[in-house]
Image: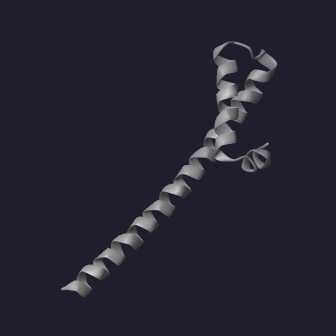
Amino acid sequence: MAKKIDLLSYEEKEERLEEILNRLDNAKTNMNELAKEAKEAGLLIISMRKTLTKSKQELIEVFKAIEAENTGLESETK
């Protein structure tokens, strides 16, 4: 199941998680499926958090590069 989840886009993971949560909220999941869906929801959340953490780190690096470039340009104009 984890490999299948990793192949989904972030948006697909979000949609699947929403489906599961709606079923759980509306009591549309029988007891046999409850544990399976709860596990899948947990795996989706973990995978989504990893994606967000990776994206955050990439953005930090981009902003650091921009800041370094701006600092270099400021030095050249003085």
Considering only vertical position in the picture, is 1 above or below 31? below
Q: Position of residue 49 (x, y in %)?
A: 57, 46
Left or right side of 7 for 55: left
Residue in view at x 45 percent, y 67 percent? 62
Considering only vertical position in the picture, is 77 above or below 18? below
Q: How is the image coloured?
A: one colour
Q: Position of residue 10 (x, y in %)?
A: 64, 45
Locate the C terminus by quadrant: bottom left
Which residue is at the front of the view, 56 or 77? 77
Furthest residue in direction top, as rendered: 27
Furthest residue in direction left, as rendered: 78
Q: Quadrant of residue 24?
A: top right
Which residue is at the front of the view, 55 or 2? 55
Left or right side of 77 for 52: right
Locate the N terminus by quadrant: top right
Could you tell me if residue 41 is visible in this image?
no
Considering only vertical position in the picture, is 13 above or below 33? below
Q: Position of residue 69 (x, y in %)?
A: 36, 77
Could you tell me if residue 76 is visible in this image?
yes
Which residue is at the front of the view, 9 or 41? 9
Which residue is at the front of the view, 67 or 76? 76
Residue in view at x 69 percent, y 47 percent? 9
